[in-house]
Amino acid sequence: MGRGGQKAATPAAASAAGKATGKAPRNNAVELKRAAKTLGGLSDEELRKACEGRGFDIAGDRDALVARLAPYADGVVDKSVPDLMPLVWPPPSKFTFATIKKAIPRHCFQRSAVKSFQHLFVDLSIVAGLAYAASFIDTSDLPTWGKWLAWATYGFWQGAVGTGVWVIAHECGHQAFSPSKFINDSVGWVLHSALLVPYHSWRISHRNHHSNTGSCENDEVFCPARRDDYHDADGDLMRDVPLVTLYRLFMALTVGWMPGYLFLNVTGPHKYNGKVNNHFNPKSALFAPEEYFDIVSSDVGVLLTVAGLGYAVHTFGALAVLKYYWVPYMWVNNWLVMITFLQHTDVFMPHYRKDEWNWLRGALCTVDRSFTPVLNHLFHHITDTHVCHHLFHTMPFYHAQEASKHIKEVLGPYYMKDDTFFLKALWRSMSTCRFVPNEGNIVWYQQHD
C-alpha cells in the first residue's frame, strides 16, 4: 500500500503468520536440546508471552512452545532486547502519518542552506585540522610505536568526521540540505565523489530503500535472507562458532560497502538476482532508463577522485595516501555498514510480506540507538534519530532530535529504541540474525531452523 496506508494486521492474520513461521518442523535434536537449555529459565507463561509477541501459536505444552521458539531462543532470553513492537496495527484513531506530522513543530521541517553549509564548514575544518596535525607525526620525537598509535588515532577520528561529511551528502540526496535541488545535488555530488560514492546512483537506490523499508520482497539494503538461501543445514552449524562470526563481521565492515554493496549489491532483494545490479552501470536493474545520465555523471565523479588519488600517489607516495586518506576512508565504510546494519537488523525487528506491509509500517521497522554521545554528534545523529529520518526524510538532521521527542510520544509502543551498547548489539545481530522463514507475512530473524 502507499504512504500512510492503515491496513490493520488483525489478530487472525498475526496468528496465521505465526502458524507459518512459528512451527519448527526442521528442528533437529541438537538444536532443540540447545533451545530447551537456553529457554530453561523461562516459565511456561513467559514462553507463551514470547510466542504471542511474535504471532506464534500459544497452544500446547512446554515442549511445543520451546520447539516454536527454538530458532529465536538467544533473542528471547536476552534481557537487553527491547520490547517487541505490537503486531496488531493500530486504528487511525491511534495515529496516522498525518497525526505524527501534526505533532511536530512546523519549524522542524524548514531547510536552511546557510545552516547546512555551517555544519559542513565545521566538518571540513575538522578534517583539515586533523590532517594538518597528522603532518607532524612522522617528524616528531615519538618512538616508532607512538607514531603508529598516533596515525591509528588520526585514522579513527578522521574516519568518524568523514562519516559526518558522508551524512551531509546523504542529506543532499534526500533534498534536506537546502530548498534548492541544484545546491543539494551539486554539494552531494562533490562530497560523495570525494568519498568514492556514486552520488546519484546511491541516491536512487537509497530512495527506493526508503520507499520499501521492512519489505522482504522490495527493500533495497539489508533485505533479509530467506531460509532457502542456505542449502547446507549441517554446514550452517559452523556459523555459530564465534570465530566464524568474527570473520563475517570483519568482512562486512571492511568490504561490505565497497565492493560488496556498490558493485555486487550484497544484501539486496531477490528480485535483482540474475540481473545487472551494480551502482556503476547505467543499465543496471537498479535504475530507470531516464536516469542513465545521472549514473554516468556519478561515475565521472568517482573517476575524478580516483584520478586525484593517483596523482597524489605519484606526487606524495602511496604510503602518504594510505595514511591520510585510505585508512580514514575504510573507517567511513566501516561506520556506514555498521550503522545501516544495526538500523534494520535485530532479533526484535519484524519484517513484512505482501498485504502485511505498508509504507508507514515499514518506515517504523527501524530503530534508534546511540553510538555514544561523541559519535552521535559527529554522525549528525543519523544513529539515534533514524525513526524520524525514515518518516520525514527531507527534514534536516539538525531538527531531528527535537522532532523525535514528539514522534515518540505519538507512537508509544510502535516506536523502537534500543539502549544496548552498539558493539554488543552488533555481535547479537551478526550472530543471531541469519535468515527469515520462506513463508509467512510477518517474519522474524532466525539463528537456525
Image (tube, rainbow, N blue to C red):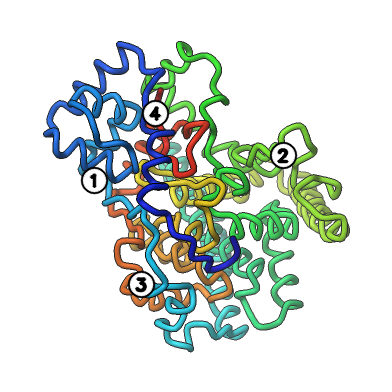
User: Can you give x and y, in whole percent of width and height, for residue 41 in the image?
Assistant: 12, 30
Q: Are marks 3 and 4 in contact (CB under 8 Å)?
A: no
| Category of crowding for the residue at label 4, using alpha-carbon neighbours closer than 10 angstroms: few (below 14), some (14–19), many (at least 20) | many
Q: Which residue lies furthest to the front in this view?
A: 12
Q: Sequence order check: which comes first, mark 1 or mark 2?
A: 1
Q: Which of marks 1 and 4 is in front?
A: 4
Which badge, 1 or 3, comes first in the chain's sequence? 1
Q: Do the residues labelled 1 and 2 touch (CB within 8 Å)?
A: no
Disc number placed over residue 272 in the picture, else none: 2
Q: Which mark is residue 94?
A: 3
Residue at 54% in and 45% down: 353
- The answer to the question of whether label 1 and label 3 lie on touching residues, with beta carbons closer than 8 A, is no
Q: What element carries label 4?
A: loop
Which one is closest to the eye, mark 3 or mark 2?
3
User: Which comes before the other along the chain, label 1 or label 4?
Assistant: 1
User: The residue under label 1 is which amino acid type?
Assistant: Ser
Q: For marks 1 and 2, give the one nearer the viewer.
A: 2
Q: Please give the label number shown on residue 80.
A: 1
Label count reads: 4
Q: In this view, does 109 lie to the left or right of 418?
A: right
Question: How many residues crowd mark 2 within 10 Å: few (<14), some (14–19), many (20+)?
Answer: some
Separation of disc 1 and disc 2 at Cα?
36 Å
Q: Where is residue 260 in the image (x, y as percent from the top left)?
A: 64, 37
Of 347 and 21, nearer the camera is 21
Residue 138, visible in the rendered structure: no
Front residue of this view, candidates 412 and 68:
68
Q: Which of the 4 image quarters holds residue 243?
A: top left
Q: Residue 447 carries which label?
A: 4
Mark-to-mark CA distance, 1 and 4: 17 Å
- The CA distance from mark 4 to mark 2 is 25 Å
Residue type highlighted by circle 3: Lys
Is 240 rendered above or below residue 124? Answer: above
